[in-house]
Amino acid sequence: MPRIGVIGSGNLGTNLGFFAAEKGISDVILYDIQDGLAKGKSLDMLEAAPIRRYKTKLTAAGSIQELYDADIVVLALGAVRKPGMTRDELRDENLPLIREMASALRHAPGIVILATEPVDILLPEFVRLSGMSPRRVLGLGGFLHSTRLRYLIGKELGVSPEDVVTQVIGRNGSDMIPLFSHTSIGGIPGTILLTAAQQKSLAQKLAKAGDEILELAQRSTSYYAPAQVAAELCEDILKNTGAIRSVSQVLDGAYGIRGVAMSLPSRITKNGIEEVYLPKLTKDEEKNFVDSAAALAKLAPEA
């Protein structure tokens, strides 16, 4: 049975473990620096198994070394945003943790999924210090926002979000780029069913979606949707599905950009990012993408 290792047993990491168990994806091993937290959370989930009927093994690791041979390691550790805080402001708090994880996992053979914010800033640093192939390190980003956009479009049109296919690319944050020209609803092009005014409104709602949840909850950032997205990525990898997901990755020439991380549609397999697709962008979309990359480059931590 394959294994998913989750570093960080807070809301995001624990819900990822629960969703993985519910879906029967693989065994899950939780680790947290806080003594007893991972063990307590895994025990709590196991005690729900007789009712939920999942047979997944949920265990706790006493050290990071126990996760070295996991097929996938998800980094769900670190500080989370508070009301009024931007993703970028988390950089200095979470950077030391990601550097520590990069050193600890440099010989790990599996795939790494980065869920710690700010994903796009931290991911290149993890790749640089770990020495891992950039194709084996994926960040949550566009896939999460594509899922949110599916919900928003479904709500706007009164249709099932399951019938909505869309992509969101670029930087994880308010300047992400929803591709309405690459959107379909039940096979019908989104540009036919959505007016220009609706598209603009949906883009604005999407840009504020994460902040809205944060401001309403007043405690921490969202975690149910990110945890489900991470679980879906794990399933894509372990089942070698070839699903197309917009994931954050270190760019190597896409639209003339190198060295920074942003989300692009990619074919996900057991090897991680198997192939990257470059959607045809309008002049404005490409300018926004390039400008976001330039802004991220300025935020890159010093080596």
Image (cartoon, rainbow, N blue to C red):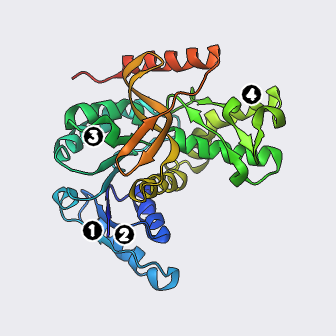
Discs 4, 1 touching: Cβ within 8 Å: no
Inter-mark Cα distance, 4 to 1: 46 Å
For label 4, count other residues whose C-alpha is less than 10 Å away and answer few (under 14), some (14-19) or many (20+).
some
- First-in-chain label (1 vs 3): 1
Amino acid type, label 3: Ile
Q: Is residue 118 visible?
A: no
- The dot on residue 98 is 3
Discs 3, 2 touching: Cβ within 8 Å: no
Q: Which residue is mark 1?
A: 60
Inter-mark Cα distance, 3 to 2: 23 Å
Inter-mark Cα distance, 1 to 3: 21 Å
Q: Residue at x 40, y 45 (%)?
A: 115
Inter-mark Cα distance, 2 to 4: 42 Å
**Quarter placement of the N terminus:** bottom left
Residue 272 on image: x %, y %: 37, 45
**Where on the picture, by quarter, is residue 180?**
top right
Amino acid type, label 1: Ala
- The dot on residue 242 is none
Mark 4 element type? helix
Amino acid type, label 4: Lys
- The dot on residue 200 is 4
Q: Is residue 180 visible?
A: yes
Q: Which residue is mark 2?
A: 41
Mark 3 element type? helix
Amino acid type, label 2: Lys
As displayed, is residue 52 above or below residue 221?
A: below
As displayed, is residue 108 above or below residue 258?
A: below
